[in-house]
Image (cartoon, rainbow, N blue to C red):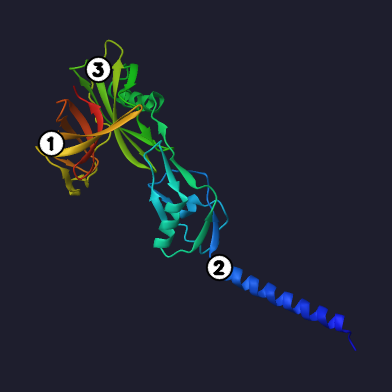
């Protein structure tokens, strides 16, 4: 016959085992715990929960849940733990967050360099005039694009007003398309050349007109250390991604701008 001490030990072990099972079951049904990163680097337009989380996740983890929009290329945005928690509650996701109170979100970008553009101009020039040689290429502003861009030369022509050539490009990356311009000087003795290196899409006429001649739109201006949005007068109709002429309503300067959305453009180059 077992002693009282032995019976007490068996009962106590049973109770402890039961409590352990209960604790295990409770832990399994409790909300998950997510550890946030201190710094998030992305290239897409939206920041998702998967981008924010440093801790391992389960196969059914809702990582595609959008937390916020990404900042502009090459800039930083701070997102608080409270903001992330509010988004999770909105989607009825019950997670406990831990880690930094503020998450830094940076959108990957790099500046366009002359080295990116010169080979495209040289290739186009060889077809038009094999003797033509480039003296210099100048970008009119700091152009930020995605981390792995591709470049296309759209047009190349002589501008008698500045006695230089103008070259228009489109950079395509995971962040979208960006139109911009550069000025080019050729060595002396080269006859004026005009090149249309990339034709417009055959389906461009099917796109809706987003800015109209004689109407006001807003134009984004960007440069080293500054950005602004100014009202402009549209000098021609424009469809999505098209390049159009506009006039700053305040300074009366003319610009060539890319159509981004309805009544919204981005400055590509200044015409005067």
Q: Residue 230 falls in which quadrant of the image?
A: top left
- Badge nearest the viewer, 3 or 1: 1
Res. 164 mark: 3
Specify few, some or many for label 3: CA neighbours under 10 Å numbering under 14, 14-19, or 20 or more. some
Q: Nearer the viewer, mark 2 or mark 3?
A: 2
Q: Secondary structure at mark 3?
A: strand
**Could you say where residue 216 lies in the image, as x and y percent from the top left?**
13, 38
SS at mark 1 in the image: loop
The quarter of the displayed image where residue 179 is located: top left
- Above or below, 49 against 195 in this view is below
Front tag of 2 and 1: 2
Q: Is residue 47 left or right of residue 259?
A: right
x then y, percent, for residue 86: 41, 57
Tell which circle, 3 or 1, labels the residue nearer the N-terminal end.
Answer: 3
Residue under label 1? 236
Mark with earlier residue (2, 1): 2
Q: Is residue 65 visible?
A: no
Residue hosting label 2: 30
Mark 1 surroundings within 10 Å by alpha-carbon count, few (fewer than 14), some (14 through 19), many (20 or more)? some
| Residue 187 in the figure: left or right of residue 104 | left
Reply above or below: 138 against 51: above
Look at 64% across and 75% down and name the residue there. Answer: 22
Find the distance from the CA under tag 2 to the CA under tag 3: 69 Å
Is residue 267 depicted above or below 52 in this figure? above
Q: Earlier in the sequence, mark 2 or mark 3?
A: 2
Name the mark on residue 112. Answer: none
In the rendered image, residue 103, in percent from the top left (x then y), is placed at 48, 45
Q: Residue furthest top?
A: 188
Q: Residue at x 47, y 51 (%)?
A: 81
């Amino acid at each position: 016959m077992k002693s009282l001490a032995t019976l007490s030990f068996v009962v106590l072990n049973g109770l402890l085992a039961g409590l352990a099972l209960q604790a295990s079951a409770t832990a399994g049904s409790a909300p998950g715990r997510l550890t946030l990163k201190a710094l998030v680097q992305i290239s897409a337009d939206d920041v998702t929960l998967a981008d924010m989380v440093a801790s391992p996740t389960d196969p059914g983890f809702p990582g595609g849940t959008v937390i916020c929009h990404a900042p502009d290329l090459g800039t930083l945005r701070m997102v608080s733990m409270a903001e992330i928690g509010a988004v999770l509650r909105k989607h009825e996701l019950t997670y406990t967050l831990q880690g930094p109170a503020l998450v830094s979100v940076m959108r990957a970008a790099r500046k366009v360099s002359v080295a990116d553009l010169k080979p495209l101009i040289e290739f186009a020039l060889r077809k038009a005039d094999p003797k033509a040689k480039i003296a210099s290429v100048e970008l009119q502003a700091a152009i930020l694009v995605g981390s792995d861009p591709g470049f296309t030369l759209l047009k190349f022509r002589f501008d008698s007003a500045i006695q230089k050539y103008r070259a228009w490009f489109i950079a395509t990356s995971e962040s979208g398309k960006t139109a911009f311009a550069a000025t080019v000087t050729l060595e002396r003795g080269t006859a004026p050349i005009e090149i249309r290196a990339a034709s417009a899409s055959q389906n461009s006429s099917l796109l809706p007109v987003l800015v109209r001649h004689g109407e006001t739109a807003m134009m984004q201006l960007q440069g080293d250390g500054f950005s602004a949005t100014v009202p402009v007068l549209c000098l021609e109709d424009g469809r999505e991604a098209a390049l159009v002429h506009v006039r700053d309503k305040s300074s009366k300067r003319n610009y060539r701008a890319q159509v981004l959305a309805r009544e919204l453009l981005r400055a590509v180059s200044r015409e005067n």
